Amino acid sequence: MKMLLVRKFRVLILMVFLVACTMHIMIDLLPRLERRGPESRPGCSCPPPAAAPPRAAAPRWPSKHTLRILQDFSAEPASNLSSQSREAAAERAAGGAGGGGAAAAAAAAAGRARRLIGPGAPRPPPPAGNAAPLAALFEHPLYRAALPPLADGDLLFNVNSDIRFNPRAAEQPEWQNEDHHEEFLPTGETSIDSYPNWLKFHIGINRYELYSRHNPAIEALLQDLVSQKITSVAMKSGGTQLKLIMTFQNYGQALFKPMKQTREQETPPDFFYFSDYERHNAEIAAFHLDRILDFRRVPPVAGRLVNMTREIRDVTRDKKLWRTFFISPANNICFYGECSYYCSTEHALCGKPDQIEGSLAAFLPDLSLAKRKTWRNPWRRSYHKRKKAEWEVDPDYCEEVKQTPPYDSGTRILDIMDMTVFDFLMGNMDRHHYETFEKFGNETFIIHLDNGRGFGKYSHDELSILVPLNQCCRIRKSTYLRLQLLAKEEYKLSLLMKESLLKDKIAPILYQPHLEAMDRRLRIVLKAVSDCIEKDGYDNVVENDFNTDVNTVATER
């Protein structure tokens, strides 16, 4: 009798185990089965055909949720597309030109016609003038100064040009990305000229810059970011807000930040800097500003209109991301992912009906191939509602910093000043850490990553961002001369930025008041440097970082 009970117990345990395995397999297969159904076709929200047998269970999509109109979304139905900003810009342009009501109506109609412009569609070229200010700027001697000769130790990668690019090498574990164990980076057959543009970008990185001034691979890479087929998508771990890792058909990868605010919206005055939204257009504008300042320390970033159904939901293998997709009461595709802030149905990202705008930033080389060191910014904010950081209460804080490695020697303190100017022009208060390539030690540039909290306010200049410059009173001569150049009418910063940003596929990128704010902030920076020179003397403030010949020509021009 006892043996019979033991056998029955064993059979029961086995049956429970088999049922659990079966349920696990069914749950794992449900996303794929759902994807094949008619209701998963892009943009389709209609019920299944009448001939199909009735289903006892509801569809796999979560039930419809009532979406609130939040601070980060406009009440307009097209608020999650650049078309709203384009329509507003078109109407203002038509009205300002004195064309009357008919011209304004025609401009508005043209904006509506462009509402669902495809990501690969060509944009109209910028209006032709007597001369392109941006091209003239890059021909200026200040933008043609040569780098020191590069030794083998100054290159991030020493590439054998005979080695060919082989995409199948991506399947080897040693080439896989730490954060995304999918297809990734290899080097292996064909010559360097045949390498994909993301790989050309990687092998061009050196001790002094992320990319050279006239590297044709950068423009080609920007085009790849908006045209390459997306083969897989996954959420990026860490961070406070939702970001997606997108892998392309050519094995390149980029970080996608979706649109959360329209161009016209400012950060609410009661928002703390650490709870502000990350703006996709700020990432795009930061890349262009960094290039105009001739820093070249921001990885290439481009705007793209993404089909949420075909290019995110249908290609993701991230179950946590897939499960957050739903159809809104307005029959728009929405999702919210998982993150610390703003990842809920109340803060969902919704398409129109399934198109969403975002920024795509090219990945830097994988950490397994090129390690990066993370540094705490000496002028980091407290990230607290009531406490202040030490630099906010100690006017002599910079003297302490200058006695601490790596700021006690080399160019790191000047790099911090460059970053300070860069952040002030954007209004970015969220610079808590920065990174450098470990291979180059302390004698290298700071990588200007994560600029999404810039361009939040055009009506306010946050002077506390300039505290490092005011306390240290140090700046590179090349930076100072370029800032003076960009303050001149023929090289006006706002006009150069406007021209540069027009090249992006989702232009206009910045609201006009943001462009005007940069000119105003540039004058504030120059006044701060002027005050330092008056107090400490020119030679003690301005550090000469290039040879006399270039300096003389640039100053005389």
Image: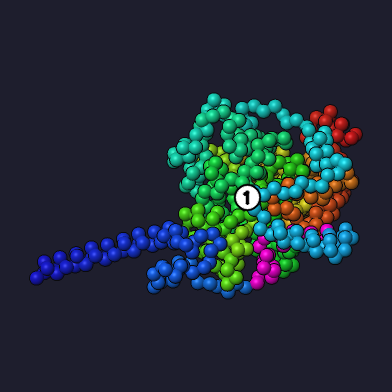
Q: Give the percent coordinates (x, y) of residue 63.
A: 50, 72
User: Does the magenta segment cover residue 89?
Assistant: yes
Residue at 69% of width from left, 47% of height from top? 122
Magenta residue span: 69-93
Residue at 46% of width from left, 67% of height from top? 48
Residue at 87% of width from left, 31% of height from top? 552
Is residue 286 visible to the viewer in this orientation of the structure? no
Extreme top residue here?
Answer: 162
Instruction: Specify how the rendered protein is coloured.
Output: rainbow
Q: Give the percent coordinates (x, y) of residue 507.
A: 73, 53
Q: Give the percent coordinates (x, y) of residue 58.
A: 44, 71
> Left or right: 522 with respect to 309?
right
Q: Nearer the viewer, residue 76 or 214?
A: 76
Q: Give the percent coordinates (x, y) of residue 338.
A: 53, 61
313 to 363, vertically: above or below? below
> Left or right: 426 with respect to 172?
right
> Left or right: 73 with respect to 41?
right
Q: Which residue is mark 1?
A: 360
> Left or right: 29 with respect to 107?
left
Q: Nearer the viewer, residue 359 or 453?
A: 359
